[in-house]
Amino acid sequence: MYVGKIDHYILRPHLKENMNTQTKPYDSSWYPIPKGYAKCPCCDGTGLVELTEKEKVYSWNKDKTHKQCSNCGGQTMSGRALGYSKIDPNTGLGCEHTVIGRNAGRCYHIYTCTKCGYSYDIDSGD
Ligand SMILES: [Zn+2]
Ligand SMILES: [Zn+2]
């Protein structure tokens, strides 16, 4: 039985697909963006950005052409880009964050965007 396109996406949630797909951005146009958020301007909603020529030469980037977008999630502890970012009140569009970091403990840093107030923390301790 042919299940159609919608069922195909339900069976493969977009986040999982995004994590495993390093070469082809997924189609996010069908996916609802939470209130207060809009399409990420850095990756155009795909959650993936193309590697620079410089980055492509590293051995750990072998066969990789894209990386998780560092504006909408790739920069966080989970490393998972969502394809959308908080709305910048000045533009009404997805924010291209300008983050400032502060040390909040030995290996603990809190980063806050000066434009939309989005914040995330990085605990580099182990
Ligand atoms: Zn992004
Ligand atoms: Zn921001």
Image (tube, helix red, strand yellow):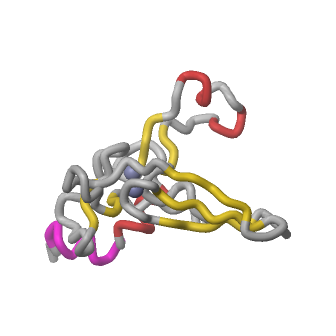
Total marks shown come to 0
In this view of the protein, can residue 69 be seen by the observer?
Answer: no
Relative side of 24 to 55, left or right: left
Closer to the camera in the image, 100 or 40:
100
In this view of the protein, can residue 44 be seen by the observer?
Answer: yes
Image quarter where the N terminus lies is bottom left
Closer to the camera in the image, 69 or 29:
69
Q: Is residue 40 above or below residue 13?
A: above
Question: Where, by quadrant of the figure, is residue 26 drawn?
Answer: bottom left
- From the top left corner, tell me how far across and down residue 79 is, in percent: 57, 60
Closer to the camera in the image, 2 or 57:
57
- Magenta region, residue range: 4-12
- From the top left corner, tell me how far across and down residue 44 is, in percent: 29, 46
Is 10 covered by the magenta stretch?
yes
Q: Main secondary structure of the magenta part?
A: helix
- From the top left corner, tell me how far across and down residue 107 is, in percent: 80, 65
Which residue corresponds to the image point at 57% horizontal and 35% vertical from the top-left? 63
Q: Is residue 26 above or below residue 64?
A: below
Which residue corresponds to the image point at 61% horizontal and 30% vertical from the top-left? 55
Relative side of 52 to 12, left or right: right
Q: Is residue 40 above or below residue 125?
A: above
Which residue corresponds to the image point at 85% horizontal and 69% vertical from the top-left? 126
- From the top left corner, tell me how far across and down residue 67 is, in percent: 51, 45
Relative side of 60 to 40, left or right: right
Is 82 covered by the magenta stretch?
no
Q: Residue furthest top?
A: 53
Which residue corresponds to the image point at 28% horizontal and 61% vertical from the top-left? 87
Q: Is residue 89 above or below residue 3?
A: above
